[in-house]
Image: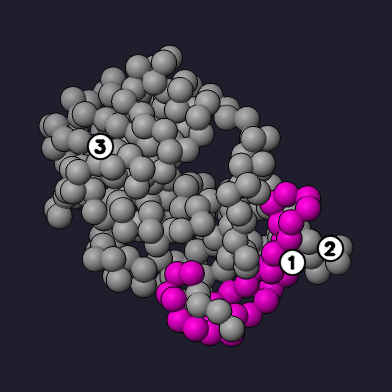
Amino acid sequence: MANCPLCHDLVEKRVLARVGIVPDATSDLVQCPRCDVICFDPLPTVDQLSRFYARVKFGLRPRASVAGGEWFGRRLNRIAAKGRLLDVGCGTGYFLAGIRQSTDWEVAGVEFSREAAAYARDTLDLPVRRGDLQAAAYPDAHFDVIHLNNVLEHVTDPVGLLAECRRVLKPEGSFHLGVPNGLNDVRNLIDFHRLEGRPGRSPSGHVFFFPGRTLETLFDRLGLTVVSRRTASLKPGLR
């Protein structure tokens, strides 16, 4: 038995499959019976994650990303005419660029990839800090809105990341989280192991898989109130 990395309960976790993100390291894929989170056990090391992401090429997709930022900017304008927004895991920065050109909001980003962060700073002239959110060391209650899209499932300490988001978010601020449907997202890894008899490799680098109930419980613990939820990208979800 070991403590669940999310709810911290000492429980016997259910083993679902064998998995990995690099060829020479495998983990159990386990589910906590208390909070339902599914994750790698053990979680990948920093070296394994670095080796995995060294092979990942960041697609620029400027038009789609800028359009997404402009769409989000229209939502921001309904909140307030001005404010501070942080995009955690901002990639090459085109989403932030779309917000900047469609609003009067002050934008900032944090990005773990050295190459993507440098592109956002040097090419798009965006205030992007390289590294994780804690290393960025923003002041308490600094941002009106925090955007965290398709990031939480990649990190090895999602509770710590969400807690840091809560710290730098104003008490009346708005937190926008996007994650894959955890139960859908993990299905291919489980099926591959059952059919092939060997570990499934996570092509996306996802190491946590969140059912909705898990996130709601975690938000409540961190003092985040769920205001609304919706399903996006229905076709990929069905596939």
Say if the magenta span includes residue 29.
Answer: yes
The image's mark for residue 48 is none
What SS does tag 2 mark? loop
Q: CA distance from mark 3 to mark 2?
A: 44 Å
Image coords of residue 52 (percent x, y): 66, 43
Residue drawn 69% across the image and 64% down it: 27
Q: CA distance from mark 1 to mark 2?
A: 7 Å
Along the viewing direction, whichever of 170 and 69 lies nearer the viewer: 170
Amino acid type for the residue under numbered disc 2: Arg
Mark 3 / mark 2, whichever is N-terminal = 3
Q: Nearer the viewer, mark 3 or mark 1?
A: 1
Residue drawn 17% across the image and 48% down it: 141
23 relative to 136 in the view: left or right:
right
Instruction: Provide the residue designation for mark 2.
Output: 198
Within-10-Å neighbours for mark 2: few <14, some 14–19, many 20+: few
Residue drawn 50% across the image and 77% down it: 3
Along the viewing direction, whichever of 45 and 228 lies nearer the viewer: 45
Amino acid type for the residue under numbered disc 1: Arg
Say if the magenta span includes residue 191.
Answer: no
Image coords of residue 62 (percent x, y): 48, 22
Amino acid type for the residue under numbered disc 3: Leu
Along the viewing direction, whichever of 80 and 189 lies nearer the viewer: 189
The image's mark for residue 18 is 1
Quadrant of the rendered structure where residue 209 is?
bottom right
Magenta region, residue range = 5-33
